[in-house]
């Protein structure tokens, strides 16, 4: 009986883990990501370098279209196998996973700190919103400069 209940428990646990969608997992990763000033600085410098690299590619528009339909795992694999992306991340002491979770965590925390309401698409932990509010005057101009002064709201 103990073996049966152990196997049943394992099967139910695996089923529950598989039932969690990639979007739900990414959402939880973003909520769990803890922003600090050193991390925000790392992310901002990496965003700048990565943006310049991706925009310089001849198939930029096609890449952006494809990336929008990829799962988080596919985005991670693509970033890890691209030598230039990997080099940019290494230079900024980030993993692809840290970048792919940290960038939206930073962007959305800044958006919420500016009064954009949270929704299914805009999420931020209370701690990250507090951080963003405390450092908005410093971080927002840097992100706006990376985005070409147009912001992302």
Image (cartoon, rainbow, N blue to C red):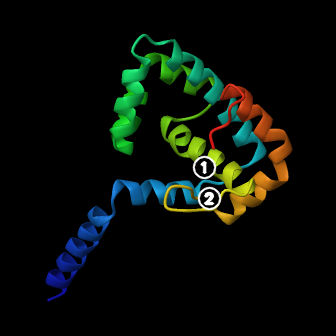
| Location of residue 71 by image quarter | top left
Q: Secondary structure at mark 1?
A: helix
Q: Residue at x 59, y 44 (%)?
A: 102
Residue furthest bottom as drawn: 1
Q: CA distance from mark 2 to mark 1?
A: 6 Å
Q: Position of residue 76 (x, y in %)?
A: 40, 37
The residue tagged with tag 2: helix, strand or loop?
loop
Residue under label 1: 105
User: Could you say which is closer to the camera, residue 95 or residue 149?
Assistant: 149
| Residue found 55% across the figure and 38% down from its top | 99
Location of the N terminus (image quadrant)? bottom left
Q: Which residue is mark 2?
A: 124
Above or below for 126 versus 37: below
Residue 91: assigned label: none
Q: Earlier in the sequence, mark 2 or mark 1?
A: 1
- Say whether residue 64 is left or right of residue 11: right
Residue 61, picture quadrant:
top left
* Residue visible at 33% across and 59% down in the picture: 21
Query: Residue 37, position in %: x, y?
Result: 77, 44
Q: Is residue 4 left or right of residue 46?
A: left
Callout 2: few (<14), some (14-19), or many (20+) C-alpha neighbours within 10 Å? Answer: many
Q: Quadrant of the C terminus?
A: top right
Cβ atoms under marks 2 and 1 closer than 8 Å: yes
In the image, is residue 81 above or below residue 123? above
Quick check: 60 left or right of 33? left
Q: Residue at x 29, y 70 (%)?
A: 16
* Residue 4: percent from left, percent from top: 14, 82
């Amino acid at each position: 009986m103990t073996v049966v209940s152990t196997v049943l428990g394992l099967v139910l646990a695996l089923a529950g883990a598989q039932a969690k969608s990639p979007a739900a997992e990414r959402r939880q990763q973003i909520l769990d990501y803890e922003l600090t000033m050193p991390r925000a600085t790392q992310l901002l410098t990496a965003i700048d370098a990565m943006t310049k690299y991706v925009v310089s590619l001849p198939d930029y528009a096609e890449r952006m279209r494809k990336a929008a339909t990829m799962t988080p795992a596919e985005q991670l694999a693509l970033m890890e196998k691209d030598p230039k992306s990997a080099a940019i991340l290494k230079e900024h002491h980030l993993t692809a996973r840290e970048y792919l979770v940290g960038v939206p965590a930073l962007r959305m925390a800044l958006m919420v700190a500016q009064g954009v309401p949270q929704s299914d698409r805009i999420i931020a932990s209370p701690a990250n919103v507090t951080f963003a509010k405390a450092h908005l005057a410093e971080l927002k101009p840097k992100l706006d400069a990376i985005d070409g002064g147009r912001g992302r709201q």
